[in-house]
Amino acid sequence: MPLLKDGRIVEDHWQFIGDDDDIPVQGDIVVSFERLKNSIEILVMRKGYLGVRLDNDADAHDLAPYINNLALIALEFPAFTDGRAYSQARLITTQLNFTGELRATGNVLADQGVFMSRCGFDAFEIDEHQPPHLWLSLANAMSLAYQKGYRARAGFSPRAVVASRVG
Amino acid sequence: MYRYDEFDATFVRQRVAQFREQVARRLEGGLSEDEFKPLRLMNGLYLQLHAYMLRVAIPYGTLSSRQMHKLADISVKYDKGYGHFTTRQNIQFNWPELKDVPDLLDELADVEMHAIQTSGNCIRNVTADHFAGVAVGEVEDPRPVAELIRQWSSLHPEFTFLPRKFKIAVIGTREDRAVMKSHDIGLRIVRNDGGDTGYEVHVGGGLGRTPMVSRLIRAFLPRPDLLNYLEAIIRVYNLIGRRDNKYKARIKILLHETGKQEVTRLVEKEFDQLKKQNDAVSPAEYERIAAYFQDPAYEDTDFNLDAFDEKRKQHPQFNLWLNSSLSEHRQRGYSIVTVSLKPIGGIPGDASAEQMHGVATCAEKFSLSEIRVSHEQNLVLPFVKKQDLFELWQGLKKLDLATPNVGLASDIIACPGMDYCALATARSIPIAQDISNRFADLERQHDVGELKIKISGCINACGHHHVANIGILGLEKKGVEFYQITMGGEAGENTAIGTVIGRGFSGTEVIDAVETLVDTYVELRQENETFASTYSRLGVTPFKEALYATA
Amino acid sequence: MQILTANRLVDGDVVFLTGNYDWSIEINDASIARDQTEACRLEDIGTKADKSAHVVGCYLVDVVIVEGRIEATHYREIMRTKGPTVRGDLGKQANVYGSGGLRSGQSPLAAQNHHEVQQEFAHVSL
Ligand code: SF4
């Protein structure tokens, strides 16, 4: 899956580690929340950045004790119509004050890019059939939004949401 | 009424342009139907039995004459010359072509209208009391806050893919004309002892397969906290509402399964967080919106009661119409007039282009160019001077819009049913038409008095049959349509869900059945008793006996 | 016996798969599956067609032949081939029944059994 970040495709240096896989000695890794909880002592000792993938029915507040150890949080859209990860993203960025990479995975479509960005996502595992220019042109389609508190994360779209006013 | 400023206007235009691009991508094959469907639904576009259907929002049920003229023009240019007013203050066009819809939406934008979020699992068109701003005893006009919520919920980034659709209604009076308690969130404007304005917050109402009356979770929410509180409710719902079963995904099920107390606790907890983090509703923004809804300059009218009474005597039809169509206005010398979209034997809620133009013109002459749309599928002229009533009546009569049946047996709510709707299990319109024809004698209807008959063509209950005196649900059995009767439902402040009274009926039998129920009431009623009060005094038994006795 | 039906993407009109693998708005042009194998074949075509930018929501419909003409058996499908029973002037039936419509002079629920009316739709190949 191409990784879209800052408006372009970037190389993905993160390795997603399954629960039964060995933890590599170095490199940046993403583990499940279960593993994060169970092996946090080991995980924080190793070289390389740490990330977690959180199921979309998990309570994002449970990440609070670990938030300072994390450089990436991956949330999932099992289907693009399943919008739980929007709220998770919002909690993670506004209540846990997470500022690392917040990645959208799963059924991640360009037409929802602006919504994701405004909820706090800044990295997107995109479908090959939807190139970055489509993402950007869709993001530029709307320059206005009503919800003041939901600002697109920097770098996603030059025009998206320059103005807002309620809520 | 509210007027778009540049921000609103640009927002809607950009949304149309965005949809135009999405339609183009779909037609070229760049989007699959699975991907496109939620996008078109977000713009109110359904694919129905025979064609596409576009549902246009009439926010809080308020329309200007100019907008009504435009709807009429659109129905001619892009549809087949008529529109259907629904139970949620929307109008539906039944035949637009996909390729034309972006142009249609652009024309709507010309008159500050749109179809945003009239479908899909998002926050739907916000509805309100159709007597807003003119109702007697109103704490405050509910439309400014409905408009605020409309703006706040438009393309809300977090709440666009909820477990299921989400409906909000606002009222400002004790009487509930907006079926507020059948909404996911119902707000009633109240004033506390300190004189501050705030809201009662009712959550978890809904009709459909599992009808429920909403529960009060907050008796007084101060105005500045409104949007934060809504955000908290909907966030909790988005995160823990069920998604495994479409029929269990509404917030009413969450309330039912998780319990009111626990849901309230979660909402309050989230709300406490949000209060720290977000701004409150800015008084300036609220006032900016409210300024559009100020009272018009009412005139002191010199109403000649004697001449009026003379007209009533001369024209019994006019008299009959007055008896059913007028509601008390808060301003002396004025009346609220309900315009029946239920001609005898007609299709409930349908209006031809000619009728739409006609009503718009009547409103220009007699109602300060303003029209309301009620959830009962009628139109309302909110500012009619009493002295103009006769002339208005004559105008409406020419348009076949003066049937004196508002609130009576033939003022039937009916969803489109299988004649149009892809989800239907049976037809509803023909049943409404046949009942209406059975009670064609208007004197008889007036004698029977207030009666709410409501018909749905499937368990989704768009026709509100659960909250009717006589509710009818169309179902299918072994390849044939049949109809179940519900009694004891009520829509107003004492909203109650009716119960099925017995075995179902064929489409012909059900008409006789309704008549039997009405005759039973007429026989048993005491002086001044309505159908509903006779029913609550005697219960279902006499009605059941009358209906099933022969067996 | 079954036929394959869908709605046309561009305007939503009800269409039927013909023997030439195109779509017609006229039910009598439909290719009929007379056994399970043929029905499966139609269904496969439907699955593919659903991915196209041509039609939406393919599915099989039970039909019978009445006096040499194809008729759907379920009332829902009968309505799809005709139009709203409450507006005889609209939909496919409009060309046939005139402005009186299906309902004129008959009980609404008899409309669905209205087999004897001549159907004279123009064949439109898509
Ligand atoms: S109640 Fe059913 S048939 Fe009627 S409009 Fe709603 S979904 Fe369609």
Image (spheres, rainbow, N blue to C red):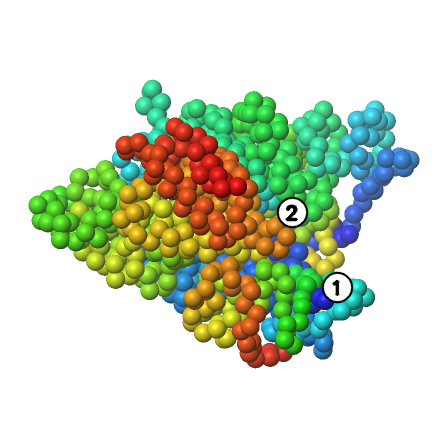
Query: Chain for mark 2?
Result: A
- Residue B374: image location, x then y, percent: 37, 46
- Residue B38: image location, x then y, percent: 60, 53
Q: Nearer the viewer, residue B394 or B79?
A: B394
Task: Classify mark 2: residues with Cα within 10 Å, few (<14), some (14-19) or many (20+).
Answer: some
Q: Nearer the viewer, mark 2 or mark 1?
A: 1
Task: Classify mark 1: residues with Cα within 10 Å, few (<14), some (14-19) or many (20+).
Answer: some
Amino acid identity at mark 2? Thr
Q: Which mark is residue A38?
A: none
Residue A59: which quarter of the image? top right
Going 59% across and 60% down the picture, which residue do you hit? C75
Q: Name the residue under label 1.
A: C43
Residue B260 shown left or right of residue B138 in the figure: right
Q: Mark 2 points at which residue?
A: A81
Q: Is residue B16 above or below residue A146?
A: below
Query: Is the C-beta of the residue carrying label 2 under 8 Å from the nearest atom of ligand 1?
Result: no
Secondary element under disc 1, as helix, strand or loop, is helix
- Residue B292: image location, x then y, percent: 31, 44
Q: Is residue B376 above or below residue C38?
A: above
Q: Which of B369 and B467 is in front in this view?
A: B467
Residue A102 shown left or right of residue B156 in the figure: right
Q: Which of B434 and A25 is in front in this view?
A: B434
Amino acid identity at mark 1? Glu
